[in-house]
Image (cartoon, rainbow, N blue to C red):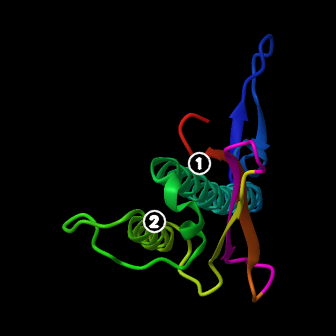
Amino acid sequence: MKLARVISPGLSSGCYRPLSRSGGFTLIEALLGFLILSIGMLGIASLQAVSLKAGKTSVYGSVAALKVEELFENIRANPDAISSYTGDGVSNNCYSSNCNSVELAENDVYLWKQGLTAGLPATADTTTEVTVIDPAVPSKMATVTITVSWEERSKDSETGVSKSFSSTSNICTANPC
């Protein structure tokens, strides 16, 4: 065992102490500190994963809201064929050929559904529903409800989580309203 000479103030001669009691970290203290740091880093990684999932859910909700408003604007621009917006849609290529109002409505729905497919999760469970309630005489305001439903992945279940966005708007069907 090595000894170190320690001189105290006021004493002429120093005393000797073993070096093994001198300050410093032991291996166990260092490992304990590393363990605490590792647990903290795992907690931060877990929060990051939850944050990414919440961000993706928010994006899907925003896409659905924007696409629903887009279809409302298409219906407002073509109120003569308001009942044609409830169908599945057909690609009538109305941008390079002349279409009547019904064909334009079918083309609008087709393109709208293509945009939804691109913006929402790629599952077979994405559905849309457009409901039109005709105006009651003497009103010229029809009530249109658009609902978009989709399914997101979930770590807690195999089937996923069903989400939906629905909006209702009054659309003027004739001028003046």
> Which quarter of the rendering shows the C terminus?
top right
**Please, what secondary structure does the residue beneath circle 1 have?**
loop
- Magenta extent: 136-157
The answer to whether residue 116 is left or right of residue 45 is left
**Please, what secondary structure does the residue beneath circle 2 have?**
helix
Q: Report x, y in % for residue 89.
A: 48, 77
Q: Is residue 152 magenta?
A: yes
Estimate the spatial distance between the alpha carbons at disc 1 and disc 2, rounded to whole Å.
14 Å
Q: Is residue 122 magenta?
A: no
* Towards the viewer: 59 or 3: 59
Q: What amino acid does circle 1 point to? A: Thr
Q: Residue at x 65, y 63 (%)?
A: 53
Label drawn at residue 173: 1
Image quarter of residue 82: bottom right
Image quarter of residue 6: top right
* 73 up-or-down from 8: above or below: below
- Farthest-out residue, top: 10
* Towards the viewer: 86 or 165: 86
Mark 1 and mark 2 lie on one chain; the one further toward the N terminus is 2
Q: What amino acid does circle 2 point to? A: Ala
Whether residues under marks 1 and 2 lie with C-beta atoms below 8 angstroms apart, the answer is no
Q: Residue at x 79, y 47 (%)?
A: 21
Q: Residue at x 56, y 34 (%)?
A: 176
Q: Residue at x 64, y 54 (%)?
A: 58
* Towards the viewer: 15 or 37: 37
- Using a 10 Å C-alpha cutoff, classify the residue at mark 1 as few (fewer than 14 neighbours), some (14 to 19) or many (20 or more): many
Q: Report x, y in % for residue 172.
A: 61, 43
Which residue is tagged 2? 105
Q: Report x, y in % for residue 124.
A: 60, 87
